[in-house]
Amino acid sequence: MQRSSLAVSLSLAALGFAAACNRPAPQQQQAAAPAAPAPGVQWTAVVLYNQPKDTAAFEKYYAEKHVPLFASHAQEIGVTRAELVRFSPSADGKPAPVYREADLRWDSKEARDKGMATPGFKAVAGDIPNFATGGFTVLLGTKTN
């Protein structure tokens, strides 16, 4: 499998896994209709980038290619907010276990699922292996505060 196909497959697998985990058990489905989310609830996709083999190469590619690629597809993907974090070394100087985080937000689960199914999202996800030489993890969730 090509690297970009692997990234897309991983992203889609994470989406499928999250959807399966979010379904209530059959007996719960009949019990009550789901409650509407509280005002301000946001649905997230978080990408955690492990420490890369070469941080300078990571940063150059991330700033010059990946972030502009994401920005060019942001409207299609439908994100309402994106936060990018680079983690600092710990007090003892050791690198953080996670190098960077990209936190993407949508106003509903449906909007997130629709956005993650777009060709633009697939292009952005397919680009990740080009610079994430330390590996990465995709997490789906709901902002709870």
Image: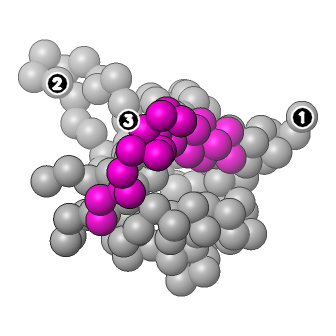
Is residue 84 in sight in this rendering?
Answer: no
Q: Secondary structure at mark 2?
A: loop
| Amino acid type indicated by mark 3 | Tyr
Mark 1 against mark 3, which lies toward the viewer? 1
Quote the CA–CA distance across marks 3 and 2: 12 Å
Q: Residue at x 44, y 29 (%)?
A: 51
On the picture, is 134 further left or further right than 12? Answer: left
Taking the magenta stretch, the answer to whether it contains residue 24 is: yes
For residue 90, the mark is 2
What segment carries the magenta color? 12-36
On the picture, is 97 further left or further right than 111? Answer: left
> Nearest the camera: 16 or 79?
16
Q: Residue at x 87, y 39 (%)?
A: 2
| Amino acid type indicated by mark 1 | Met
Q: Position of residue 79 (x, y in %)?
A: 45, 73
> What residue is shown with label 3?
99
> What residue is shown with label 1?
1
Q: Residue at x 68, y 46 (%)?
A: 12
Q: Position of residue 142 (x, y in %)?
A: 33, 51
